[in-house]
Image (cartoon, helix red, strand yellow):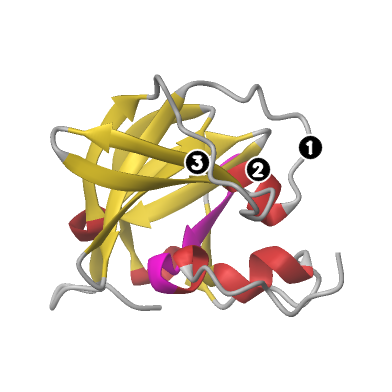
Amino acid sequence: MTNASHSGSAEYVTVTVGSQLFGLPIARVQDVFVLNQITRVPLAPDDIAGVINLRGRIVTVIDLARRLGITGSSRAHLAVGLESDKESYGLVIDAVGEVLKLGADTAEAAPANLDERLRHVAAGVHRLDDRLLVVLDVDRLIDLKPMEIAA
C-alpha cells in the first residue's frame, strides 16, 4: 500500500459509486463540488462526461461508474476534484463519506478475484467491519488512454 505515513497509517476520503466504497488518498483530493453545466466533448470516450469551468479552471469530468463498469450508480451531480500532472479532473460519484484513518493492519493487496477494471486502478484494499474499501490509484484512474481491458 502507498500513502502510508511513518506511523503506518493513511487517511482516505471515502466515496461511493453504486454500492462500492472507494478510498482516495486525502492528499490528492482538492475539493468536492456539485456539477452543473457540463460541456460534452465531441468524440470523447463514454466515460468522459465532459468539461466544466470550476473557479476559472477547465476541469475534465470523468464518470467513475462508466470508467469502472459499475452498475446501480445514481449518476449524482457530485464530483471530487483531483489534480494530476498539473491538470484538473473531477470524478463523478454518488456520495462522499467520511475521512478514514486506516492502519496497515487492515491493508491488503487487491484480491485476485476483484473485477479486472477495479484491480487495474486499485492501490490495494482495506477490509472494514462491514465492507471492502478499494483504495484508488489516482494516476492510473485518471489516465485518459483507453484501458486495455476487455469490458
Specify the amino acid type for callout 2.
Ala
Taking 63 as reference, is 97 above or below it? Answer: above
Cβ–Cβ under 8 Å for marks 2 and 1: yes
- Earlier along the polypeptide chain: callout 2 or callout 1? 2
Specify the amino acid type for callout 3.
Gly
Percent coordinates x, y for residue 70 in the rendering = 74, 44
Give the CA separation, mark 2 to mark 3.
14 Å
- Earlier along the polypeptide chain: callout 2 or callout 3? 3
Percent coordinates x, y for residue 117 in the rendering = 71, 66
Which residue does the numbered mark 3 point to in the structure image? Answer: 50
**38 or 25: nearer the viewer:** 38
Which residue does the numbered mark 1 point to in the structure image? Answer: 71
Which residue does the numbered mark 2 point to in the structure image? Answer: 65
**28 or 135: nearer the viewer:** 28
Residue occupying the point 76% across, 29% down: 72
Residue 88 makes an appearance in the image: yes
Report helix, strand or loop for mark 2. Answer: helix
